[in-house]
Image: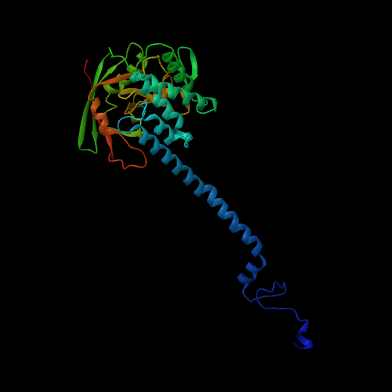
C-alpha cells in the first residue's frame, strides 16, 4: 500500500463510513437507519406474538380443556364410581380450568346415586380446591343467601355424609300449562317435545314464554348452541320493549337436562333475557340460583341425545336447528 492510499477513508459497502454513498438513496437511507429498522423488526415480532400467537395459544388451550371435560363426562361406565374416581381425578389434575367443574359434576352424580364412598373422595378433593382459592367468585342464590358454587355443593355433600338423606337433583313434575314444540335439524329431521310449566313458582317467566308461543314469535326461529349445555332459541317480538325479567329462582328447581329457562341478560347478569329461551341438553347446575327454571320436558326427552355436542375436538354434525312449530296444549 503506497503512501497516497494508506490513510484514505474506506468507501466500500459495510465500512460504516459516514461519508460513504452508494449512489442509491434507498440504500443510503437503510444504511443510515439500520439500527432503527432492527428495532422495528423486533417490535413487529413482539406485537405479532402478543396480538396473534398468544391469543391463539390461549384459545387452543381452552378448546383442549373443554374436550377433556366432555371426555370425562362421557366415560363409559361412568366417571365417578368409586373404582373409576382415582383415574378421573388424575386426568384433570393438571387442568385448573375444568378440575373444579369435574369435581362438582362428580358430587352431583354421587348424590344422585347415593354413593357415599365416592362422595367422601370428592368432598376431600373439592375442599382442597376451595382452600386453594379455586372457583372463587362463582356464586349462586340459596335459601341461606349467596354462596359459592363449590361451598354449596360441599355443604350438601357433608350433610349427607353426616347422616342426612340424599336428595336427588331432579325437578318436580310440572302442574302448569303444557306446550308442544317441534325442532327441525338440518332442515330434514324433526323432533317433537311436550314441556310442562312451573307457573306456580315462576309466573312471570311462564307468561313471557306463553306470550311468545301465542304471538308466533317462537316459530321459525333459528337455534344457536350455548356451549354444549343448551340450545338457545331467540324469538322476535315478545318482550322486546322491556327486554328483561327479574329472576324467580326457587331452590329445588334445577338447571338439569331437559329443563327450560331464559338466559342471563347481556350486560345485566342479575336479570333474565325473555328473548333467549334455553333448552338444556346437559345438567348445568352452576346456573342454579342465577336464572329461572320455568319448565321441563315431559315427552320427547330421549331426542336430546341426538342434539348433543362433543366439544371443539369433535365434528358437529348439526348445521342448523329451527323451532318450526309451538302451540299451547292445555
- Residue furthest to the bottom in view is 2
Query: 141 or 75: nearer the eye?
Result: 75
In front of the other: 324 or 278: 278
User: Height in image: 248 above or below 316?
Assistant: above
- Location of the N terminus by quadrant is bottom right
Q: How did the renderer colour the structure?
A: rainbow
User: Residue 176: x and y, percent?
Assistant: 28, 13
Nearer-the-camera pick, 85 or 17: 85
Q: Quadrant of the C terminus?
A: top left
Residue lying at the far front of the rendered structure = 83
Task: Give the side of residue 73 with respect to residue 305, left or right.
Answer: right
Image quadrant where residue 323 sits? top left
| Label total for image | 0
Q: Is residue 304 left or right of residue 1?
A: left
Task: Give the percent coordinates (x, y) of residue 68.
Answer: 39, 37
Q: Is residue 233 visible?
A: no
Residue at (20%, 35%) from the top-left corner?
189
In-image side of 275 versus 99 (left or right): left
Picture quarter containing residue 310?
top left
Which x, y percent locates residue 187? 22, 38
> Of residues 196 and 213, which is closer to you in this image?
196
Q: Position of residue 307 (x, y in %)?
A: 28, 33
Residue at x 43% of width, y 27% of height: 103
Residue 212 visible in image: yes
Q: Residue at x 53, y 50 (%)?
A: 49
| The quadrant where residue 21 appears | bottom right
Amino acid at each position: 500500500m503506497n503512501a497516497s492510499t494508506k490513510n484514505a477513508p474506506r468507501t466500500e459497502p459495510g465500512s460504516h463510513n459516514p461519508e460513504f454513498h452508494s449512489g442509491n438513496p434507498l440504500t443510503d437511507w437503510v444504511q443510515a437507519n439500520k439500527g432503527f429498522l432492527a428495532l422495528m423488526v423486533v417490535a413487529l415480532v413482539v406485537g405479532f406474538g402478543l396480538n396473534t400467537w398468544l391469543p391463539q395459544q390461549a384459545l387452543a388451550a381452552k378448546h383442549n380443556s373443554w374436550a377433556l371435560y366432555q371426555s370425562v363426562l362421557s366415560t363409559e361406565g361412568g366417571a365417578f364410581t368409586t373404582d373409576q374416581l382415582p383415574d378421573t381425578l388424575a386426568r384433570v389434575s393438571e387442568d385448573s380450568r375444568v378440575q373444579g367443574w369435574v369435581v362438582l359434576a362428580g358430587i352431583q352424580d354421587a348424590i344422585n346415586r347415593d354413593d357415599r364412598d365416592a362422595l367422601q373422595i370428592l368432598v376431600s378433593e373439592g375442599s382442597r380446591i376451595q382452600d386453594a382459592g379455586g372457583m372463587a367468585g362463582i356464586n349462586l342464590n340459596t335459601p341461606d343467601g349467596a354462596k359459592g358454587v363449590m361451598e354449596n355443593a360441599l355443604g350438601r355433600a357433608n350433610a349427607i355424609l353426616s347422616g342426612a338423606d340424599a336428595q336427588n337433583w331432579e325437578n318436580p313434575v310440572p302442574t302448569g300449562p303444557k306446550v308442544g314444540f317441534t325442532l327441525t335439524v338440518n332442515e330434514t329431521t324433526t323432533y317433537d317435545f311436550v314441556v310442562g310449566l312451573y307457573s306456580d313458582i315462576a309466573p312471570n317467566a311462564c307468561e313471557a314464554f306463553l306470550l311468545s308461543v301465542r304471538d308466533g314469535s317462537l316459530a321459525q326461529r333459528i337455534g344457536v348452541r350455548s356451549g354444549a349445555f343448551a340450545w338457545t332459541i331467540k324469538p322476535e317480538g315478545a318482550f322486546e320493549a322491556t327486554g328483561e325479567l327479574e329472576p324467580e329462582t326457587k331452590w329445588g328447581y334445577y338447571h338439569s337436562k331437559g329443563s327450560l329457562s331464559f338466559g342471563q341478560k347481556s350486560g345485566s347478569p342479575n336479570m333474565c333475557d325473555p328473548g333467549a329461551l334455553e333448552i338444556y341438553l346437559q345438567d348445568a347446575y352452576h346456573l342454579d340460583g342465577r336464572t329461572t327454571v320455568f319448565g321441563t320436558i315431559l315427552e320427547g326427552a330421549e331426542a336430546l341425545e341426538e342434539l348433543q355436542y362433543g366439544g371443539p375436538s369433535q365434528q358437529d354434525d348439526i348445521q342448523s336447528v329451527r323451532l318450526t312449530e309451538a302451540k299451547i296444549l292445555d
